[in-house]
């Protein structure tokens, strides 16, 4: 069980970094058109879309990625607390 929780936490951490990189790529013109940008779009957009449907942008600022990142952070912390309760 420890292995599964540790694996899930590592996957969440890697995905969080991918999400951060994808979000930062929006600051650079044509960065999302690269092969890395397209790969990150394929793995990040399905996760970000539900948040974008729920949370409207504030002016020109889309805060839904921040909420999506916080949800990942809470999931990771939840797994950590489960790990400590089990172990």
Image: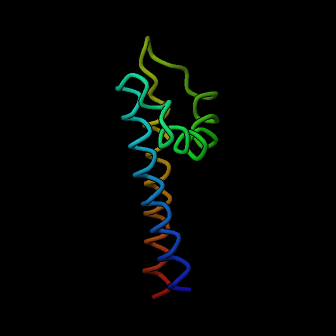
The image shows a total of numbered marks equal to 0
Q: Residue at position x 35%, y 26% from top?
A: 28
Residue 33 coordinates in the image, percent (x, y)? 50, 30
Coloring applied to the structure: rainbow
Residue sticking out furthest to the top? 59
Nearest the eye: 20 or 36: 36
Q: Residue at position x 44%, y 11% from top?
A: 59
Q: Residue at position x 45%, y 88% from top?
A: 87
Residue 58 coordinates in the image, percent (x, y)? 45, 16
Give the quarter of the image for residue 61.
Answer: top left
Query: Is 62 located above or below residue 85 in the figure?
Result: above
Query: Is 86 located above or below residue 51 in the figure?
Result: below
Query: Is 24 located above or below residue 58 in the figure?
Result: below
Query: Is 29 located above or below residue 75 in the figure?
Result: above
Residue sticking out furthest to the front? 35
Residue 14 coordinates in the image, percent (x, y)? 44, 59
| Quadrant, the N terminus | bottom right
Lateral position of residue 31 relative to residue 7, left or right: left
Residue 18 coordinates in the image, percent (x, y)? 44, 49
Q: Residue at position x 42%, y 30% from top?
A: 31
């Amino acid at each position: 069980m420890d292995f599964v929780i540790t694996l899930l936490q590592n996957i969440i951490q890697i995905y969080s970094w991918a999400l951060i990189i994808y979000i930062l790529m929006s600051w650079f013109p044509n960065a999302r058109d690269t092969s890395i940008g397209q790969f990150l779009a394929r793995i990040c957009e399905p996760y970000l879309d539900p948040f974008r449907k729920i949370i409207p942008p504030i002016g020109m600022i889309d805060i839904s990625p921040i909420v999506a990142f916080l949800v990942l952070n809470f999931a990771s912390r939840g797994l950590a607390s489960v790990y400590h309760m089990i172990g």
